[in-house]
Amino acid sequence: MRPVAAAHYAPTALVQVLEGLPRHPYAELAHMRADAPAGMSRAQLLAALQQAAGKLGADAIVVTRLSREGPPADSLRFAPSGGALQQVAVPRAWHAEALAIRLGAAGGNGP
């Protein structure tokens, strides 16, 4: 996480997830990045970002990048017992970048 705001806000409990910048004024609080371990869901990753942003006093995060990396969801591997090929489910890891913002903040960004 890289804070960008000098102002400090009280923590918030409800943090919205936005897919684009809002049209009304807002203040940028921090650029955030999260790498989820394999097996963690997209929803869990976004919830972790929301929780971290809430501690900064953000009331929204703008997701700027969301990707899933790793081997294909199903992969062929040799069975250890006899060398035959078997299909195995391989979890892929989520990666996200977001901007923590405070909506309606005076002197912020936006129109």
Image (cartoon, rainbow, N blue to C red):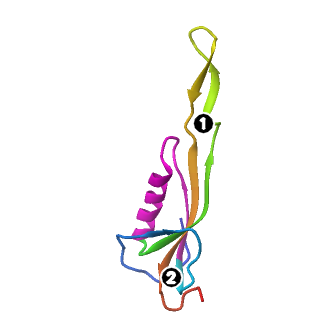
* Image quadrant containing the C terminus: bottom right
Q: Which residue is mark 2?
A: 6
Q: Residues within 10 Å of mark 1 (few under 14, many from 20)?
A: few
Q: Is residue 3 above or below residue 90?
A: below
Count the numbered circles shown.
2
Mark 1 residue type: Ala
Q: Is residue 53 above or below residue 24?
A: above
Q: Which residue is mark 1?
A: 73
Name the secondary structure under disc 1: loop
User: CA separation, marks 1 and 2?
Assistant: 43 Å
Residue 17, given in percent of the width and then of the height, sits at: 49, 67
On residue 95, the disc is none
Mark 2 residue type: Ala
Q: Residue at x 52, y 49 (%)?
A: 36
Name the secondary structure under disc 2: loop
Is residue 82 magenta-colored?
no
Closer to the chain start, of discs 1 and 2, is: 2
- Indicate the quadrant where residue 66 lies: bottom right
Q: Residue at x 65, y 37 (%)?
A: 71
Determine whether, in the image, residue 65 is placed left or right of residue 40.
right
Residue 42, given in percent of the width and then of the height, sits at: 50, 52
Comparing labels 1 and 2, the label whose residue is closer to the camera: 1
Q: Residues within 10 Å of mark 2 (few under 14, many from 20)?
A: few
The magenta segment? 29-55
Residue 73, given in percent of the width and then of the height, sits at: 60, 36
Q: Residue at x 62, y 53 (%)?
A: 67
Residue 7, given in percent of the width and then of the height, sits at: 47, 83
